[in-house]
Each structure stands twice: as structure tokens, then as C-alpha cells.
Image (cartoon, rainbow, N blue to C red):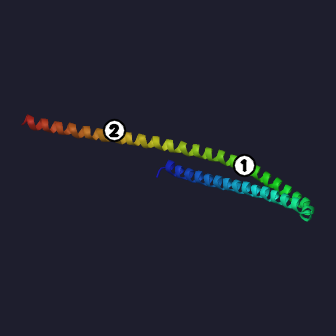
């Protein structure tokens, strides 16, 4: 196996790893967004309960402080993951370009090798034809 084929395999593996990492980050972003939406829904439900009951209303202020802090942490996490996703996409694009560079180099080598073999086969066929022609000529010319 040529060194380029080994490099191609290595870079395909690296690209696959980067794709998996990106997929994991995107799944994390989805989970965080879902968690934020659940928090928003929970806050709305608590607000409605606080409006309906004075007893619940007294405890709502403490709940709201905790919910606000939780929302802030979720938003920070979402922003951090978004930056990580952008970086992972850039890394994946770089890995893809590097893989393509090696694949194109290998295609060029393969094409040159096929052409070399085609020329060599053509030369052999030409030699066989010339030899056959010379033999027939000697046979027809007689002694």
C-alpha cells in the first residue's frame, strides 16, 4: 500500500472523528435549548400558580431568583457550545480539504500509472505485431 493510501485512510479517520465530535456538540446544543425551553415553560407555570394563590406567590420570588440564575447559566452554556460548534465546523472543513488534497494526489498517481501501463502494453503489442510481420515476410520471401 502506498504512503498516500495510508495518509488517506488516516485523514478519513480524522474526518470521521471530527464529524462525530460535531454531531455530539450539536446534540448538546439541542439538549440545552430543550432544557431552556422547559425552564421557560416551568417559569410560566409558576407565574400562573403564583397569580392564583397568595401562598404560592410568597415563594415565587425565591423561585424566580433561582430560575433567572439557571437561565443565565443555560444561555452561557448555549453560547459556549455555539462557539465550539463553529470551531468544530472549521476543523472539519480543514480536515476535509486536507483529505481531498491527498485523494487528488492519489488519483493523479493512479492516472499516471494507468497511462504508463497502457503505453507499455501498446509498445508490447507493437513489438509483437512487428515480430509477426517480419516472420511472415521471411516465410513468404522463401529461402
- Label 2 SS: helix
Total of numbered circles in the picture?
A: 2
Q: Is residue 22 or residue 123 the one in the foreground?
A: 22
Quarter of image, res 131: top left
Q: Position of residue 47 (x, y in %)?
A: 85, 58
Above or below residue 140? Residue 83 is below
Q: Badges 2 and 1: C-beta atoms under 8 Å apart?
A: no
Q: Position of residue 31 (x, y in %)?
A: 71, 57
- Residue at mark 2 to residue at mark 1: CA–CA distance: 55 Å
Q: Give residue 119's mark.
A: 2
Badge 1 density bin: few <14, some 14–19, many ≥20, Cα 10 Å: some
Q: Who comes first in sequence, dot 2 or dot 1?
A: 1
Position of the C terminus by quadrant:
top left
Above or below residue 129? Residue 30 is below
Q: Residue at x 46, y 43 (%)?
A: 107
Q: Is residue 26 or residue 139 the one in the foreground?
A: 26
Q: Residue at x 17, y 36 (%)?
A: 133
Quarter of image, res 37: bottom right
Q: Position of residue 59 (x, y in %)?
A: 91, 63
Badge 2 density bin: few <14, some 14–19, many ≥20, Cα 10 Å: few
Judge left or right: residue 136 versus residue 103. left
- Label 1 SS: helix
Question: Residue beneath label 1, please?
Answer: 82
Judge left or right: residue 17 versus residue 114. right
Q: Position of residue 19 (x, y in %)?
A: 61, 52
Q: Residue at x 73, y 54 (%)?
A: 33
Amino acid at each position: 500500500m502506498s504512503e498516500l493510501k495510508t495518509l488517506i485512510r488516516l485523514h478519513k479517520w480524522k474526518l470521521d472523528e471530527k464529524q462525530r465530535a460535531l454531531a455530539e456538540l450539536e446534540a448538546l446544543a439541542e439538549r440545552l435549548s430543550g432544557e431552556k425551553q422547559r425552564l421557560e415553560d416551568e417559569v410560566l407555570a409558576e407565574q400562573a400558580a403564583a397569580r392564583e394563590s397568595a401562598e404560592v406567590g410568597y415563594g415565587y420570588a425565591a423561585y424566580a431568583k433561582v430560575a433567572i440564575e439557571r437561565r443565565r447559566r443555560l444561555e452561557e452554556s448555549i453560547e459556549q457550545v455555539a462557539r465550539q460548534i463553529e470551531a468544530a465546523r472549521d476543523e472539519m472543513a480543514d480536515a476535509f480539504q486536507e483529505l481531498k488534497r491527498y485523494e487528488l494526489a492519489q488519483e493523479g498517481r493512479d492516472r499516471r500509472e494507468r497511462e504508463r501501463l497502457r503505453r507499455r502494453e501498446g509498445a508490447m503489442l507493437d513489438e509483437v505485431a512487428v515480430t509477426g510481420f517480419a516472420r511472415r515476410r521471411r516465410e513468404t520471401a522463401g529461402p
